[in-house]
Amino acid sequence: HDSGSVRLQGPGILNELRIQFAGDADDAPFRIVADGAVAVDMKVSEFWGFSRKLRPLARMQSLVLGVFDDGTYYCRFPMPFRKELKIETAAGARVTTQTAKGWPAKEHFYFRANRITDTTEPGRDIKILEAAGRGHFVGTIVEVADGSMEGDDRFYVDGEAFPPSWHGTGTEDYFRCGWYFFGGALTRPLYGLLDNGTPKLAYRFHMADRVN
């Protein structure tokens, strides 16, 4: 599809999405609507976590999200839908999809992604997600200020009190690195540091260690 818009009929599960843009993609819209509910409504640079124009050395080629060397954006998060899935982005973009037909399991969770803006201050946590109901937290891409590396990562599930069962030891440790990202940029299947610029841009995706 070269119109920048795709409409898929269900039931089905979108297993892979690829987008090739004719020009600069940073400010291009990226919107997904599943069964009438908005799943994603962000700029391309927000959903993929970085601006290729402002951070030209950034590289992310994870198992589920990233940008190939030829500039093609890809997303492999499963996105189930019963009736219809709509994908919208910049006009002229080439969108390709891989979809499994049907609704094979009794229950599938809808995909959701949001952009959170917050700033660090002493004595207060940055809240990445607060949600109710059933679901899995599958990951995050975070812009990390250099002065916030000792912030512990914590997940409070179903009303847990402090300290929760998941209580990490530092920001860069959560992203599977250490010593303030001492080793520099790297891109791994489920975690990485996009480049050596500042502020830090890091990602982690929970596949084998999902939070639910």
Image (cartoon, grey):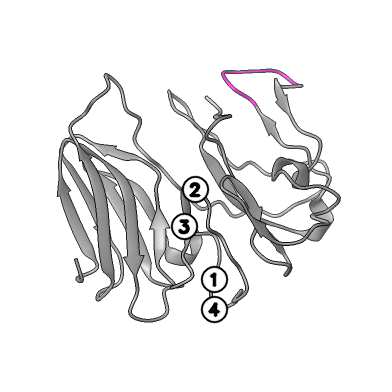
Residue denoted by label 1: 51
Q: Is residue 129 left or right of residue 195?
A: left
User: Which one is closest to the eye, mark 1 or mark 2?
Assistant: 2
Residue 63 image label: 2
Residue denoted by label 3: 47
Which residue is nearer to you in this view: 169 or 164? Answer: 169
For the residues labelled 2 and 4, the Cα–Cα distance comes to: 23 Å
204 magenta-colored: no
Residue denoted by label 4: 53
Q: Contact, CB < 8 Å: mark 1 with mark 4? A: yes
On the image, the x and y values in percent for residue 58 come to 61, 68
Sequence-earlier tag: 3 or 4:
3
Residue 212 image label: none
Looking at the rendered structure, the kind of residue marked 3 is: Phe
Looking at the rendered structure, the kind of residue marked 2 is: Leu
On the image, the x and y values in percent for residue 165 come to 70, 20
Q: Is residue 169 left or right of residue 45?
A: right
